[in-house]
Image: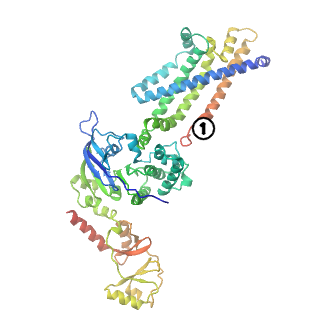
Amino acid sequence: MIAFIDSRWADILFRAYQHTSLVVQSMILAAVIAVGLAVLVTTIRRLTPVANAVSAVGLTIPSFALLGLLLPVVGIGTVPSVVVVTFYAALPILRNAVVGLQGVDSTIIESARGQGMSGSAVFWRVRLPLSWPVIMTGIRVSAQMSMGVAAIAAYALGPGLGSYIYTGLTQVGGANAVNYAVVGTVGIIVLALLLDALLVLLSRFTTSRGIRA
Amino acid sequence: MTQQTTTGAALELVDVTKSYPGQKSPAVDGLSLSVPAGETVMFVGPSGCGKTTSLKMINRLIEPTSGRLLLDGEDITTKDPTTLRRSIGYVIQGGGLMPHMTVAENVGLVPKLLNWDRGRIASRVDELLDLVGLDPRIYRDRHPRELSGGQQQRVGVARGLAADPPVILMDEPFGAVDPITRQRLQDELMSIQDELQKTIVCVTHDIDEAIKLGDRILILDEGARIAQYDTPERILAAPSEDFVADFIGSGSTLKQLSLLRVGDLELTEPQTCRIGEDVAEVTARVEAAGESSVVILDERDRPREWLFLRTLGRHAVVSEPTTELQTVVDHRSTLSDALDSMLVSSHGGAMVIERDAYIGVITYDAVTEHIRSLRVEAA
């Protein structure tokens, strides 16, 4: 095992980098989409239950199946991986953003408007900062999940550590099969923990001291 | 601390109506009202009478269905509501502070929206925190949750005053604090208002608060129908209808006592003397004036004792009084506070001071006479 890691160290690091890069970039995209949608559905109240249903049902679709459905449409490689990871990453963020934005005390919003804040000022300077801790929690849940979903991307020849797991599975009984699978799996777990730690720090530094738990 | 004296703007509501779809009768039905510049008007009435709706229509948090609002003669019904609100202070119950912003950021909210430069905002914030009795060095960087309810309310008042708006709207400003803090905040608001002379419109359900703070009181019934709009004195002395009388409740004469300030009444001026004067001379002077008691002042005009001549006669010269005085009231004290002091006095009155200096004496007779004249005036 040690010899296996030693001989492929550079490759493992490169794939870990690719894996993280895929997850982080997809998540930034997902966060922007999810928060945007959350603003829309909390403004138009009729849409709120729709959004909650979508985020609940969406999570029940097997990622493997979704990837398979996407292959004929977007081909193989990085694009289907980004689409799938973004799709799953957006769901928990959407759900938390809806809850967070709805949880902002309406008297505070009215107080902000009463002081002469415009609609966009109320969003950027009151609603978003106040719902930020809840949204960040959604982002953390989403990050953990995306690490796993990104591994599936290997099926579509996407980047990342998923290809090690995939190689391990296809070579069952082969010399390095177990090594491939273990390095891929443990690597993803380590990355997930590191990313989570970073997000905890990020959340702390971007949340006002006045509302920190 | 420097504080420019700014006079408020006159506010006029003309036939303002608010009806909600699906409701039979309008929440506010043709309210017309004029508030003179620099006065405090209290909106009172039972729950659901439309007092808060009326208030929120002034800064257009609620858009009137019809009618016009005039601020210093200018129609504000068509003005951009966001711009309008920056020129109208807004203070709500509990302060309505932004929990994620510091005290300084909360107070500087409107100045920042008006693009003041940083230095000007910072000095304005400190000035206002001083004004509402919070030490800027201690409280500037705190967050609302680190403050008590009363302190949050003070910050809310400071925020309402921040951009020096001519009109300030207050919605149950002291409803969320304990009675002792409430009384203190009311007193502070009164002295701030003495200094700044803003036009204040304040909603309350507490008639005593309305009597204490208001230059005028607007008593509203269902649909914001005006039951009576008058000075507190006249509302107490002559309620226009049974609804008003019920709303004021019993003991309206006693309520008047907390409305009147000692300085509002005519003070009597008995003979005075200085410490160290010759008693025989003083006695002759007091007897010549046909009186039997004398107020002793010290070299800085502070009242030290109020004595009957027979007590004074024991010495050759007026000596330094040794007892602690209890029968002294400030000219800004309410009559009910003054009555407390009068009760312990054997002269049926209390000595009145202004900035520590003696200005006269207030007597029971003056108080009862004043109440009688209010009744006659109102009848």
Q: Chain of mark 1?
A: A
Residue lying at the far right of the rendered structure:
A3
Q: Position of residue A5 (x, y in %)?
A: 76, 19
Helix, strand or loop under label 1 = helix
Residue B336 in sight here: yes
Residue occupying image coordinates x 47% and y 33%: A101
Task: Indicate the quadrant containing the C terminus of chain B: top left, top right, bottom left or bottom right.
Answer: bottom left
Q: Position of residue B114 (x, y in %)?
A: 46, 44
Q: Which residue is mark 1?
A: A205
Q: In this rendering, is residue B201 above or below B287?
A: above
Q: In this rendering, is residue A206 above or below A15?
A: below
Residue occupying image coordinates x 52% and y 44%: B101
Residue B171 in sight here: no
Q: Amino acid at mark 1?
A: Phe
Front-most of residues B30 and A155: B30
Q: Position of residue B125 (x, y in %)?
A: 50, 51
Q: Quadrant of residue B334?
A: bottom left
Residue lying at the far left of the rendered structure:
B379
Front-most of residues A179 and B266: B266
- In this picture, residue A174 sits left or right of residue B27: right
- In this picture, residue B76 sits left or right of residue B372: right
